[in-house]
Amino acid sequence: MRAAAAAFRMQLSLAVRTPNYWMVVISTPPQVVLFLSVVDVFDRPDLVTNALMAPILMNMWSASLWTGGAVMRDDRWLGLLEIHAASPQPYGLIVASRVAAVILLSLLVIPVTLLTAVLTYGVDVEVRNWEILTSTLTVTALAIVGTGIVFSSMTILSRAAVTFQAAASYPFLLLGGVFVPLELLPEWVRPFGRLVFLSWSSDLMRDSVTELVVENALARLAVVVVLGLLGFAAGLWLIRVILDKVRGTGEISTI
Amino acid sequence: MGAVETFDLRREFRTSGLRRGETVVALQDVSLDVEEGEIHGLLGPNGAGKTTLIKILSTVLLPTSGRAEIFGYDVTESTKTVRKLFGLVFGGDRGLYTRLTARQNLDYWAALYEVPTQQAKETVERLIHLVGLDGRAEDRVETFSRGMRQRLHLARGLVADPPVLFLDEPTVGLDPVASLDFRGMVTGLRDEGKTIFIATHDMAEAEAICDRVTLIDHGEILATESPRTLGAWISAFEWVEVLGLDIETRDILEAVPGVASVADQPGGWVRFQPEREDASAEILQLALNHGFASVRTGYPSLEEVYLRTMGDRGMEV
Amino acid sequence: MTAGTLRIVQKASRVGLEDVRAQYTWKSWLFGWIARVTAQVLFFAAMGLMVGGPEFILFAFVGNICAMAALMPQGAGPDTAWERGLGTLPLLVAAPRSMLPVFAGRCSFYIVQGVAEASFVFALLAPFLGFTGHWWWLPVGLLALGLGSYGLGLFLASINIRRPRIGNILFNLVFYTLVAIAGVNVPTEVFPETVQRVVNVLPMHHGILGTRSLLSDGPSSGAFAELGLEIAIGLGWFVIAMLGFRLFSEGGRRDGSIDLAE
């Protein structure tokens, strides 16, 4: 537990000093303007929620993909993969804590989004159901940590890591219905979208802003939890695979 | 029971790429033992299997067959226990979070090694002082020189105060002064009772700090020697080069007993390779007496020493 | 441009080509990069499912295709960071000629890549989205866009050399800002005067206008005027990039921020 906390704190220290980690926060305002300008041009105040949720989810997802993804890659580059393997702590726990730190930092996009919206379009959003909104955000953030571990592992296991990361951005955001809800996309796409927890999260988050009573809230939250846990499990399993390659075949090595 | 023992340790690798499926034997039935409280050197050229052995001992790599133990605990079966018994330090400037400060790096590892919180603070301070980084503890590692990083690396390996230290080529890339400093620290640790297993390809280093030296090549243990023997070899095989010799003098020098070979070098130099201690001194003296003042000497490489001592296995094990 | 400079540009563009070759196999290019770009264009075009209908879908479609062509040359920025990481930067600075031709050559390949990839994605999606129009004029518009963004990309590269840490961030910031205000998804007229004035001197805006015109109405003096303006803006930024590179060499030499490999 203490090791996990130490890893979390260490990653925060690291992130604060690494300009790339601030990328998601910095690219948020233009994105907010982009979505709000569309909503504004077509005079659709009912879509303001969509316009705000989109950059939030997009950037949290980006954070896990790029900077969460960098956690293990940086370790490998710095020759720290073996050193971690030789330590008494399970590396999976350490990686999970560090990705969590990255995601925590990415939550900054929420105030940045709101501030930008207020300053540019004078947006004033009233949230009808705070409980569901915060629960969804929390659960989504945790699920994103899980996928971050998967991304992190893939960058080590896959040679085409960069192109994999490229493919894992917009396709998932599209299927995740972060701006355009899944139900408006062509029918054949929807089953795939339902496998991406983002689609459940984005629907829930939008509903919690506009509706006081959110239909099937708990069941839908449960789906996000389950999908998120699957991501965690996959990520931790992949780390096991990596350590096996380090120790067993010696395929992955930095020393 | 020694501090570190290996029993017929074997490690094979399957090659990928062009020669797919071919097996490379990195370690062949390696059996050695390191006594508690000694600095034991593992000397060998690049590719000899030193790093592979260290990786197995530090639980980072699994052996194909055979066993290794640290204080009686099997490295593959009692991994968790074993991991608390050693510190791992390798050379070069990796192994540290360069964007963090020295102190932050040490704090992190102290936590990972479950050093009790209060003790951790004191330990980190003590280690920073031990490796001579007092003024720089709050500076980012990326501002450190190679030598400083190596010292911090050592501090990191000591954070859990392990009884055993594995050092893999720790002085590679360090300038002579930094190397000397580092060696001083290592012998200091031995004096405190730590057991140190150091892999190196530097004979002079092995001779300088080790209590015993195991020689390895192509994955096989060749011998375990005292540093004195090593020293004797070094001086026995110290070569002498003379510039602009005439044929007469060359013949005279060649006739010195103990000269194993004579070879022309670029630039008009002639190298005399002796195989007997004191032969090089004689050659030098003779050359100077005959008026040839352009001379130079050098230590043999590890490969040369190996060739001459192990070539025909003409020495005692 | 002297023969010597031309030679540098030529050699350097070969390096650029090899970089690209090294990064991608056709599989990783198709299923990775192209998949992402296609999904990105679709992501924004899909907004039309909620607002503006098919007309908006096509508007955003064309706009984002244009943005794709412009994206690549702007990527010159992070590229230089890579150069620095490789350790070849000090060698370049020490070389007798200015660094600009080198980077210009290396990144010239980006223009071609941008036009090719954007056209490819366009061809993939156009029938699916119901595009009818003078599609054969697309590469012309995209080329102008590529040239327009090229100078800006090199300017970002020169900053990046000076302050390598912010390279990636700067690139993202500039690109996303342009995508927001340069007429990609909404016309620039909807933004305040000041924003419009800024957009006028940045790449993408005129190139997009010219390309839209070409695609819907075919060749016209208006369309070519816009494309010409786009290229002129690109040239302007190219000049600024030249100054930037000169500034870097001097500045870097002065404060020792160029370090040799350890």
Image (spheres, rainbow, N blue to C red):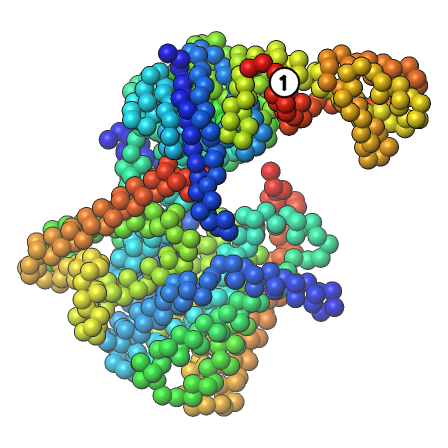
Q: Helix, strand or loop at disc 1?
A: loop
Picture quarter with the N terminus of chain A: top left
Q: Residue at the spot x=83%, y=28% of the render?
A: B270
Give the total of numbered labels. 1
Image location (x, y in percent) of residue B61: 39, 33
User: Along the horizontal axis of the image, is C58 left or right of B218?
Assistant: left
Query: Looking at the picture, does residue A38 appear above or below residue B315?
Result: below
Splitting the image into 4 quarters, where does residue A48 fall? bottom left
Q: Nearer the viewer, residue B66 or A109?
A: B66
Q: Nearer the viewer, residue C206 or B144?
A: B144
Image location (x, y in percent) of residue B89: 46, 26
Residue B215: tell me if it is visible.
yes
Q: Residue at the spot x=40%, y=18% of the render?
A: B5
Q: Residue at the spot x=23%, y=62% of the render?
A: A176
Query: Looking at the picture, does residue A249 appear above or below residue C3?
Result: above
Q: Residue at the spot x=20%, y=57% of the render?
A: A197
Residue A49: tell me if it is visible.
no
Image location (x, y in percent) of residue B87: 41, 23
Tell which subunit mark 1 falls on.
Answer: B
Residue placed under numbered mark 1 in the picture? B314
Query: Looking at the picture, does residue A10 appear above or below residue A112?
Result: above
User: Along the horizontal axis of the image, is B288 left or right of B312?
Assistant: right
Q: Callout 1 environment at 10 Å: few (<14), some (14 to 19), or many (20+)?
A: few
Residue kind at label 1, given as amino acid type: Gly
Q: Nearer the viewer, residue A146 or A34?
A: A146
